[in-house]
Image (cartoon, coloured by chain):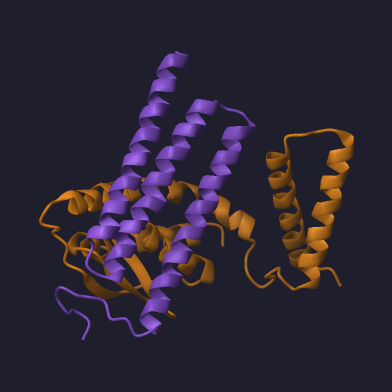
Amino acid sequence: MLDRNKFYHIASLFISLAILWLLLSGHYTPLLLSLGLLSIILVTLIALRMNLIAFEQPETFIQFIKYIPYGFWLLIEILKSNIDVCKRILNPNLPISPRWITIKSSQFSEFGKIIYANSITLTPGTISMDVDENRIEVHALSEVGVEGLATGDMDKRISEVEQKYV
Amino acid sequence: MSDLINIISGVLIISGALAIIVGLIGVFRMPDFFTRLHAASIVDTMGTMLILFGMMLYSGFNIVSVKLLLILIFILVTTPTAAHALAKSALHGGLKPMLDKDEKE
C-alpha cells in the first residue's frame, strides 16, 4: 500500500514543512511546538487527500538543493544583464532593438524546463513568452540578450545539473 | 567593525532604491508593453535583491535574516512566473510586440 517512493515523497514534504515552520516561528515552547507539529500533520494529510503530491516526479525538495550552485552562477548573470539594461534605460537615445527568437531547450524533465524558462525571464532583457516540448519563444530587449542565449551556456548548465543524481 | 557593516548595508539599500527608480523610469520611457516588462524586471531582481541583502547585513545572523532570505527566495521564484503569465496572456489577447528586425516570420 505504502511503497518506498510514496514514503520518500511524504517524508520530504513533512521535513521541508517542519524546517519552514521552525525558521518562521522563532518560539520554541512545548505548547507552540506541539501546535506546529499538529498543523504540519494536518497540511500533509490535506495535501495527500487533494492529490497535490506529484509521486511520478522526483522529490521537489531535493531538486531545489541540487540547483543551489547554479543559483549563484545565475545571480552573477542577473547582475551583469541588469547593468546593461540600466545603461540602456538611462541613455537619452534609448538604444533598444526588440527581437523575437525561438531557442531550443535540451532538458528532459518538466522541472528542468521550468528552471530554464524562469531563469530566462528572471534575467532582465529576456522574457520567455511560450514554452513547448523542446523549444522556448523568447522576447529580447536587444541583441546582447539574444547573443547570450544563442551560445546555449545556460541551457547546458541546467542540463548538467539535471543529470547529476538521476 | 559594526560601523563598517552599517555603512555597507546602507550603501546596498540606497543602491537598491536607485535600481527601483531606474526601473520605474524605464517603465515610463519604453515604447510598448513587452519592452516595459523588461524594465519592470529590474525592479523585481536588482531592487529587491540589493535592499534585502542590505537588510540581512544590517540585522546580522539571526532568525530575522533567515526570514529575509526566505522572502528573497520566494520573490525570485514567483516574479518570473508572473511576468511569463503577463507576456503570454498579452500575446494570447492579440497584442503584437513591436520588433526592430523581424527574425521570426
Residue depicted at 51% across the width and 59% down the height: B78
From the top left corner, tell me how far across and down residue B60 is, in percent: 54, 25
Quadrant for the C terminus of chain B in the image: bottom left
Residue depicted at 37% across the width and 40% down the height: B16
Instruction: Note whether residue A148 is visible.
Output: yes
Q: Quadrant of residue B12?
A: top left
From the top left corner, tell me how far across and down residue A106 is, in percent: 40, 71
Placement of A30 over or under B46, stated as above or below = above
Chain coloured orange in this rendering: A
Instruction: Note whether residue A124 is visible.
Output: no
Q: In front: A154, or B31?
A: B31
Q: In front: A147, or A94?
A: A94
Q: Is residue A87 left or right of residue B92?
A: left
Q: Is residue A84 left or right of residue A18?
A: left
Chain coloured purple in this rendering: B
Residue depicted at 74% across the width and 66% down the height: A5
Q: Quadrant of residue B89?
A: bottom left
Q: Quadrant of residue B9?
A: top left
Placement of A120 over or under A35, stated as above or below = below
